[in-house]
Image (tube, coloured by chain):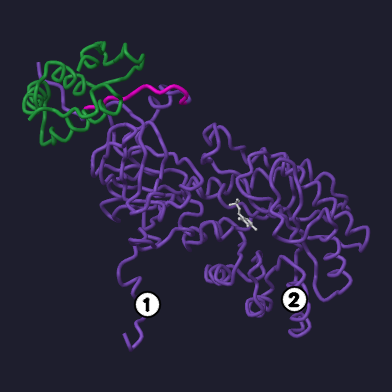
Amino acid sequence: MQRLRDLAISDTGFVFDPFSGATYTVNGTAQCLLDGLKRGLDRDGLVALLRERFECSDEDLPRDIDDLVQSLRMFGLVPGGFEVGR
Amino acid sequence: MSRPLYDRPILARHQTGLMNKFSRVASMQPQTHIDGVPVQTLIEAYGSPLFVFSEKTIVARYRELRDAFARRFSKVRIAWSYKTNYLDAVCKVFHREGAWAEVVSEFEWEKARHNGVPGERIHLNGPLKTEATLRRVLPEGTLIHIDNFDELALLERLADELHLTPKVALRVNLAVESIPAWSRFGFNLESGQAMTAANRILTGKRLDLVGLHCHLGTFILDPASYREQATKLAGLANELRRAHGAIMSFLDIGGGFASRSKLKAQYLPGEQASPSFDRYAAACAEGMAALDYPAGSEPTIVLESGRALVDDSGTLISTVIANKRMPDGQRGLVVDAGVNVLFTSFWYDHDVVPAQPFGGISEPTVMYGPLCMNIDVVRDTIQFPPMRAGDQVVFRNVGAYNVTQWMQFITYRPAVVIIGADGRHGIIRKREQLETLLASEEVPSWL
Ligand SMILES: Cc1ncc(COP(=O)(O)O)c(C=O)c1O
C-alpha cells in the first residue's frame, strides 16, 4: 500500500504517482475513497465515510467502491490481489 | 453547509497522444432535444433504441446541394439514391423537393413507383437487372444505366421484342488519382471498352444513348477527384459527338460526397475534414469546362449523392444498460443498440454525446451493443462522462445506410420516427415485434 500512500493529491483532484510519473484526475468521491483506503478503512468504513461527506440517495456504494478498487489494481496503484477488507 | 451530492467515484488516467485531450472533452455538450423535441418525450412515446429523422435537415441539405450546382450549371438533377435510405417518408421529402430516383434493384424501383415517382424519372443502376426486371420497367420509360455487354445485348433483344427504343446511359469506370477505382461497375474508359460499348449502341440504333454515368466510390474527401472525373466524362462526350454527332442529354457524376461523419482512419473530425457541397461543385465545374457542346445543348448534370444528403438528418437514441470496468482500465458502457442497428459503426467513429446534462470526470470509454458477440462495438475509445443505467446517449449523423443495411439479429429492429419542419413527430417505421418476424416463417407439416 506504499504506492497508494505516496500519491500526491491536490485539492482540485489532480493526482501524481511519483513511482511511475503517471498523472490522474479524480472526482470528490474518488478522492474521499483514496483518503479512506490510505487510512486502511474496510468496506463498511468506506461506505460510512462516503455517507458522511456526501449527500447519497439510493446509490450502490459497495459496487462503486469495488469499481474504484479495480481501477487502482489496473493502474498498479494497489497490489494485484488487493481487496477491501470486510 | 450542505454536503455535496454524491457521484460515482472516478479515477481517470491522463493519456498522451489524444488530440486536444482536454478541450474536446470540455466542449462535449449534451443533446437533450432533437429539433426542439425532448429526447425523453421521444423515448417515452416510441421506446428505445430509436432512430429519429429531421425533415428540416433533409430539406436544408438537399437545397444546399442543389444550389451549389445550380450556381454553376444551367440544368441540375438530383436523383435520390434509394439504397442509402429507402424509408418512404424520407424518400417523399426528397421527391417533394424535386428529386428523381436512383435505384439498383426491382425492389427499389417498385418502391420509387409506390412513392409516386413516374417510371421515366427513375435511373436504374447496378448489375442486378434481370430480364424480368427489364420487362417490368422498360415500358415505363425508365432510364437504364448499362453495366456490361451481356446486359447491352439483352436490352437490344428486348427493344426489338417490345418495339421500344429504351433510353439508356453508359456506366463508365475510370481512374482518378488517389482513390481506388470501382472498376467492377460499368465499362472501363481507359482501355477503350466504354468507347466500344458506345459505338455499338450508337450504330445499333435500337437503344437511345442519352447519358454517361460514373460513380467514383464513396466518402471521397478530395474534391479534385471530381474535377478529374468530369474532365474524363466530358472528354468521352466530346469523342462521341465527333464520331457520331451524338449529344448526351445528361452527364451523371454519381454519388460519393463525404458526409460529416468521421471515418475510423481519419484524423480530423468530419465537420473539419469533409468538403462543402460548394467545393465539390466548383471542382466538377472546372472539369466540365472541357465539354465541347454547341450553345443551348448543355447536358443536365445528374447527382446521385446519398450519404452526404441524409447522414446528418438521422439520430439514434440509445439507452445505457450497464457500466463495466474493462481489464485495460477503460470503462465499458453497454447500450441497447448494437452493430445490428448501427451498421455504420464498422466504418465510422460516431459522434455520440449524452442526452441529459452531465457532470463529473470524463474517462476513456468503449461502447458496446447488446449482442452476444465480441465485434459488437458501436464506439471505440472516446472520452465520455459518467453515465447511469437508464440514461440515454445520442449518436449523430447516422441517417445514411443504417436503416437499409441494419440486421434483424437477436432482437427486433427499432422504430423510426420523423420530426416535421413544424415540430410534429410521427412514426415512419414501426418497431418489429414477434408477429412481424413470424409472418414470413412457415413450419412444414411434418415438423
Ligand atoms: C451508383 C451509385 N450511385 C450513388 C450511390 C450513393 O453513394 P454515396 O452515398 O456515397 O453518395 C452509390 C452508392 O454506393 C452508388 O453505387
Rendering quadrant holding ligand 1 = bottom right
The image quadrant where one finds the C terminus of chain B is bottom left
Chain shown purple: that is B
Q: Which secondary structure type mostly characterizes the magenta part of the structure?
A: loop
The answer to whether residue B16 is magenta is: yes
Q: Is residue B97 left or right of residue A37?
A: right
Please tell me which residue lies in front, B161 or B385. Answer: B385
Q: Chain of mark 2?
A: B
Three-letter amino acid code of the residue under disc 1: Glu
State the residue position of label 1.
B441
Q: Is residue B132 above or below residue B235?
A: below
Work out which residue is located at the far right of the displayed protein and give it. B243
Check disc 2 and report its element: helix, strand or loop: helix
Q: Name the residue at 62% across, 62% down.
A: B102
Q: Which residues are magenta?
A: B9-18
Check disc 1 and report its element: helix, strand or loop: loop
Chain shown green: that is A
The image shows residue B132 at horizontal and vertical percentages of: 63, 80
